[in-house]
Amino acid sequence: DSGVTQTPKHLITATGQRVTLRCSPRSGDLSVYWYQQSLDQGLQFLIQYYNGEERAKGNILERFSAQQFPDLHSELNLSSLELGDSALYFCASSVSLAGADEQYFGPGTRLTVT
Amino acid sequence: GNSVTQMEGPVTLSEEAFLTINCTYTATGYPSLFWYVQYPGEGLQLLLKATKADDKGSNKGFEATYRKETTSFHLEKGSVQVSDSAVYFCALTPVWEAGTALIFGKGTTLSVSS
């Protein structure tokens, strides 16, 4: 158990809909990352927050947004969903901004868009 | 830009065989290098890391050495077990970037039979 929790575990929704994925980092970790894992794209970084502020953006679509709340949990919002958004979405956390820090991964949310 | 290339899988071995999974990277400066492992149905776990040239990371019998001259971080294990069957990801965190997100290779699936 990494200490990172993600809900829900599975999500099935239709094209055009909007969903929210939730992540609670390990106790004491200030940095939260979102990654998308799909068969064709592999593991791709979406966005990073540190202590409530956006720190870096990766290959995140404009239809996707995220935020980190004062209690440090984070939410990833996916809107106008397309079939190609079906993937496993991982949240990870680390204690600081040091590149050498271990990132602890949650179990993931599997999103299926039909 | 920053990227990671690792050998295509799947890699199929018998128990007690020697394992090598090749990983090379492209990055400016001295990135931190990681190997993460993903067991079926689970999130990623850090296997080992190295943060500077000639460092050797090791854990659970796995080893990898940070080779700056060849920009490589190959994963090795002297004697694999069935329980090592998983997907292995080589990754780096780049220097001179605003964030510290992991950049992953495409992953190598290892299957060990008894």
Image: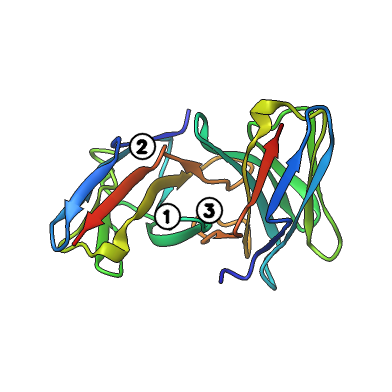
Residue type at mark 3: give it: Gly
Say which of marks 2 and 3 sits in front: 2
User: Which residue lies at the image location 52% right of the left edge and 46% below the top edge?
Assistant: B102
Of the residues shown, which amino acid type is indicated by label 2?
Answer: Tyr
- Pointer 2 local density, CA inside 10 Å: few below 14, some 14–19, many at least 20: many
Q: Which residue is drawn at 69% across and 51% down?
A: A10
First of labels 1, 2 by sequence position: 2
Give the secondary structure at mark 1.
strand
**Residue holding disc 2:** B25
- The 10 Å Cα crowd at callout 3, few under 14, some 14 to 19, many 20 or more, is many
Residue B94 appearing in the image: no
Residue at image mark 1? B36
Q: What element carries label 2?
A: strand
- Residue B38, given in percent of the width and then of the height, sits at 44, 55
Within the image, what quadrant is residue A24 found in? bottom right
Q: Which mark is residue A99?
A: 3
